[in-house]
Image (tube, grey):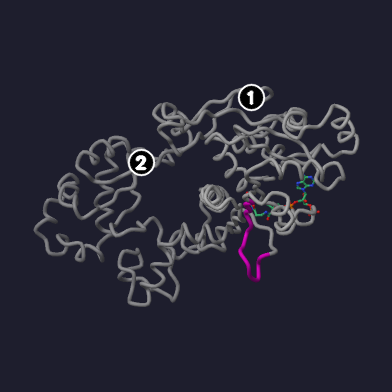
C-alpha cells in the first residue's frame, strides 16, 4: 500500500532481498508517479520504474465491498503490510491497526508519515518539507546564504531505508514472540537522525565557536548551528577545490580532506614543504584559523591536474579525496555496472533503462533486479492463486470496480 517514493523504497529493498512484494494500487489510476516526469509518452515513468522493481502489481480498491473482503484476505495471508498514505487514510478505508491486528496477529504493519505524534502529525509531507523540518536545510548551503535542500532524497528514500530496518527487526521479534507489531517512521525523525552531527555541533556551540567551520575565526556565530559551505562534518578539515577544466566543466572539482595523518605528505606534494617547520601550519590547531588559505594553496595545485589525476596522486599518499562525479559519469562507470549497483533493465513498454540496484550486498543472497510491474499486471494471478477467487468472483469484483 505504498506510493511515490518513501514506501516504495522500503518495499523495493524487501523485494530485492527476495520478498514476494505485492504492490496494491487504485484501479484505473495506480501510483501517481507512473505518470509523473514522463520522458516517453504513454509509458510508466522512470520515477515509477526505478522505485518498483521486483514487485508484483495488483489493482484493488479496499473501499468497495468486494475490495474489503479481498484486502482482509490479503492481510490474513501476508507477513508485512507497508503504507505511506496521508495520516489516517488506511484507517478511513476501515483498516486501523487494531483491526489489522485482529485479522492477523502476526502482521507487521509499517507506516511512513511526515511527522511523529505532535502538532504536525496530520500534515502531508514531501521530501523537501522533511529536509526543511528535519534540520538538513538549515545546516546546508553557503555561509551567509539561503538554506538549501540536497539532491539526495534523505527524507523519502532515507525514511524508506529506516523503515526496512524496523520491519526486519519486527519480523525477527515475531519469530520469537509469535506476535506482529506496528513499525512507524517519521520523515522528520529520519532526516534528524541523518543530521545528528549537526545536533552534536549545536551542543558544542554552547562551549565556544565551532573552529572547523568556515566562519572561524573572523565570522560570527549566532545561537544555532550555521551553514558551513563544503566544510567537513567530521574532525578533519575538508573542502571542494577546483581541478583542471573547471572553467567549462561544472564537475571538474574534487573534495580533499587534510587529515592530520597525511598532512605532511599533502603539504609536500602541493609544494609547501615549508609548512612542516612553520608553527603556523605544523599542528592541527595552528591550521584551524588558516584553513581557507590552506585550501586555496591546495587548489592552486589541483587546478593543474584533472580530477582523476588528483585522485590518482593523492590516494597512494593516504590523503582521502573524492572527485565530483556527475550522474553521466556514474551511469557510465564500469565498476558500478559490475557490482550491480547500476543495472540495465528491459521493460515491455518503455524498453531498456538504467536503475540503481541493491546497494546492500549479501554474500549468499545476491539481488537480481527485475522490471517494475505494469498497472494491474498480476491482479488475476494473485486473485486466483493467492486470494483463492474463482473466475466468476474475479469477474464480479471487476464489475464493482474493486479490482
Ligand atoms: N484504492 C482506493 N483509494 C486509495 C487506494 C486504493 N488502492 N490507495 C490510496 N487510496 C486513497 C486514499 O485512501 C486517500 O483517500 P482519502 O483521502 O479519501 O482517505 C487518497 O487515495 C489519497 O491519498 P493521500 O492523501 O495519501 O494522497 P495525496 O496525493 O494527497 O498525498 C502524500 C500524498 C505523499 C503527501 C501523502 O500520502 C503523505 O503525506 N504520505 C505520508 C508521508 C510520505 O510518505 N511522504 C512521502 C511522499 S514521497 O515518498
Percent from the top left, x then y, of residue 301? 24, 44
Quadrant location of the C terminus? top right
120 is within the stretch colored magenta: yes
Secondary structure found at label 1: strand
Q: Nearer the viewer, residue 239 or 252?
A: 239
Q: Residue at x 41, y 58 (%)?
A: 229
What residue is disc 2 on? 323
Residue 343 lies, in percent from the top left, at 51, 28
**Image quarter (top left, top right, bottom left or bottom right) of the N terminus:** top right
Residue 302 in the image, given as x and y percentages of width and height:
28, 43
Q: Is residue 211 left or right of residue 186?
A: left
- Please tell me in which quadrant of the rendered image residue 143 appears: bottom left
- Which of pointers 2 and 1 lies earlier in the amino acid sequence? 2
Which residues are drawn in magenta? 109-121
CA distance for labels 2 and 1: 33 Å
Left or right? Give the position of 387 relative to 203: right
Task: Compare residues 352 and 162 and report the one nearer the observer.
Answer: 162
Would residue 150 be counted in the magenta stretch? no
Kindly identify which numbered label has been placed on residue 347.
1
Q: Is residue 269 left or right of residue 338?
A: left
Q: What element carries label 2?
A: strand
Q: Nearer the viewer, mark 2 or mark 1?
A: 1
Toward the viewer: 283 or 58?
Answer: 58
Q: In this view, does 223 lie above or below 44?
A: below
Q: Any atom of ligand 1 within 8 Å of the CB at mark 2?
A: no
Q: In which quarter of the image is residue 249?
A: top left
Q: Where is residue 140 in the image (x, y as percent from the top left)?
A: 47, 59
Amino acid at each position: 500500500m505504498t506510493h511515490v517514493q518513501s514506501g516504495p523504497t522500503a518495499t523495493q529493498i524487501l523485494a530485492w532481498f527476495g520478498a514476494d512484494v505485492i504492490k496494491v494500487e487504485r484501479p484505473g489510476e495506480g501510483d501517481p508517479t507512473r505518470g509523473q516526469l514522463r520522458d516517453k509518452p504513454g509509458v510508466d515513468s522512470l520515477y515509477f520504474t526505478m522505485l518498483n522493481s521486483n514487485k508484483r502489481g495488483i489493482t484493488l480498491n479496499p473501499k468497495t465491498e468486494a475490495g474489503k473482503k479481498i484486502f482482509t484476505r490479503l492481510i490474513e495471508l501476508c507477513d508485512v503490510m507497508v503504507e505511506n498514505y496521508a495520516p489516517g487514510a488506511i484507517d478511513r478505508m476501515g483498516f486501523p491497526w487494531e483491526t489489522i491486528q485482529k485479522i492477523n496477529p502476526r502482521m507487521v504493519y509499517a507506516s511512513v508519515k511526515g511527522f511523529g505524534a505532535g502538532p504536525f502529525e496530520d500534515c502531508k509531507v514531501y521530501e523537501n518539507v522533511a529536509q526543511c523540518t528535519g534540520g538538513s536545510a538549515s545546516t546546508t548551503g553557503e555561509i551567509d546564504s539561503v538554506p538549501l535542500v540536497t539532491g539526495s532524497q534523505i527524507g523519502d528514500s532515507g525514511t524508506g531505508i529506516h523503515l526496512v530496518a524496523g520491519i526486519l527487526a519486527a519480523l525477527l521479534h515475531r519469530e520469537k514472540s509469535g506476535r506482529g507489531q506496528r513499525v512507524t517512521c517519521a520523515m522528520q525523525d529520519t532526516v534528524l537522525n541523518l543530521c545528528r552531527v549537526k545536533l552534536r555541533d549545536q551542543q558544542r556551540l554552547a562551549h565556544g565557536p565551532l573552529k572547523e567551520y568556515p566562519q572561524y575565526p573572523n565570522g560570527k556565530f549566532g545561537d544555532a548551528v550555521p551553514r558551513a559551505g563544503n566544510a567537513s562534518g567530521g574532525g578533519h578539515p575538508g573542502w571542494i577545490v577546483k581541478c583542471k577544466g573547471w572553467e567549462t566543466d561544472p564537475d571538474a572539482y574534487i573534495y580533499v580532506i587534510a587529515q592530520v595523518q597525511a598532512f605532511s605528505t599533502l603539504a609536500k606534494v602541493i609544494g609547501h614543504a615549508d609548512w612542516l617547520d612553520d608553527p603556523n601550519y605544523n599542528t592541527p590547531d595552528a591550521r584551524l584559523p588558516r584553513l581557507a588559505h590552506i585550501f586555496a594553496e591546495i587548489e592552486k595545485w589541483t587546478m593543474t591536474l584533472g580530477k582523476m589525476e588528483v585522485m590518482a596522486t593523492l590516494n597512494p599518499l593516504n590523503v582521502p579525496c573524492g572527485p565530483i562525479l556527475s550522474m553521466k559519469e556514474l551511469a557510465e562507470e564500469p565498476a558500478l555496472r559490475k557490482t550491480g549497483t547500476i543495472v540495465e533493465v528491459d521493460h515491455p513498454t518503455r524498453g531498456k533503462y538504467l536503475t540503481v540496484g541493491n546497494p546492500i550486498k549479501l554474500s549468499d543472497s545476491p539481488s537480481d533486479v527485475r522490471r517494475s510491474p505494469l498497472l494491474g499486471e498480476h491482479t488475476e494471478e494473485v486473485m486466483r492463486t493467492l486470494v483463492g477467487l474463482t473466475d466468476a468472483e474475479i469477474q464480479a469484483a471487476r464489475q464493482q470496480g474493486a479490482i
